[in-house]
Amino acid sequence: MAKIETRDVNLYYGDFHALKDISMKMEENTVTALIGPSGCGKSTYLRLFNRMNDLIDNVKIEGEVLVDDEDIYRKGLNVDELRIKVGMVFQKPNPFPKSVFENVAYGLRVNGIKDKHVIEETVVSSLKHAALWDEVRDKLHKSAFELSGGQQQRLCIARALAISPSIVLMDEPASALDPISTAKIEELIHDLKKDYTIVIVTHNMQQAGRVSDFTGFFYMGELIEFGRTVDIFTSPKKHQTENYITGRFG
């Protein structure tokens, strides 16, 4: 059974047809990269899985979006519960104006967890999971804004992990970071797939090649090609994919 699946998904912003008949399956404990030029639908597709497109006016969605074989757009689905299962990390680090500790504890408190011991344990394990604990263990009660950009992004990843999702969505998580911080995020993605299913949007082709097991190439709202990353990068079946990967357009 696929962890995430879309079947013939079409999405419209008003009259604009942003996603066209997208069908794709993503397996558990894999990293799937979504690549393609700006404005091709990658981020729109990513946001289907935590229903963030719901927040935009005039959006219409057709087709099925399944997480753990459940249609997440069915009537009566609890979107808050879905967003616990599906964590999200954005392009720019967006820590809250709180301490390092409270940034990670935030989701637990919002979800009604009051036990101090549980909160403390979860914060520590999430920071360890996000490969940040050694760097912040003495700064837990300092402002998150005192951390470097790369540390702030890993803090946002720890915050996403604290509420125990099974899926983590990443929308260009390293595009605002320097090369050393980017390498740490990539290493982290590789480690996290043991416990999570990860979908990452990236403009960086080399990054997609390094971190993902599967790659989907989007162009003009269509999924042109989807397959194992090694196959997409070494022997793409479609000319458009080959042209994009070799830098002839995009």
Image (cartoon, helix red, strand yellow):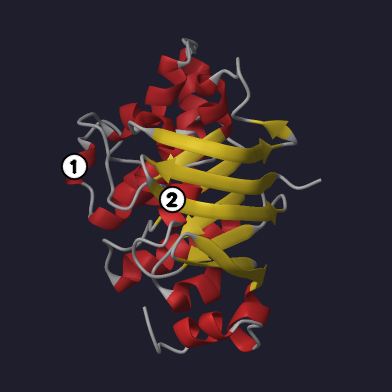
Determine which quarter of the picture holds residue 86.
top right
Q: Secondary structure at mark 2?
A: strand
Q: How many marks?
A: 2
The amino acid at mark 2 is His
Determine which quarter of the picture holds residue 42.
bottom left
Q: Are marks 2 and 1 in contact (CB under 8 Å)?
A: no
Q: Secondary structure at mark 1?
A: helix
- Circle 1 residue: 145
Image point (23%, 48%), residue name: 147
Q: Percent from the top left, x then y, of residue 20?
A: 53, 54
Decide which of tag 2 and tag 1 comes sooner along the chain. 2
Residue situated in front as seen by the camera: 221 or 113? 221
Image point (49%, 57%), residue name: 200
Image point (46%, 15%), residue name: 116
- Circle 2 residue: 17
Side of 134 where 122 appears, left or right: right
Q: Percent from the top left, x then y, of residue 158?
A: 44, 41
Q: Quadrant of the N terminus?
A: top right
In the picture shown, does residue 37 fall above or below 102? below
- CA distance separating discs 2 and 1: 39 Å
Residue situated in front as seen by the camera: 110 or 124? 110
Report the mark closest to the observer, 2 or 1: 2
In the picture shown, does residue 248 fall above or below 144? below
Residue situated in front as seen by the camera: 144 or 165? 165
In the picture shown, does residue 220 fall above or below 247? above
Q: Percent from the top left, x then y, of residue 28?
A: 72, 49
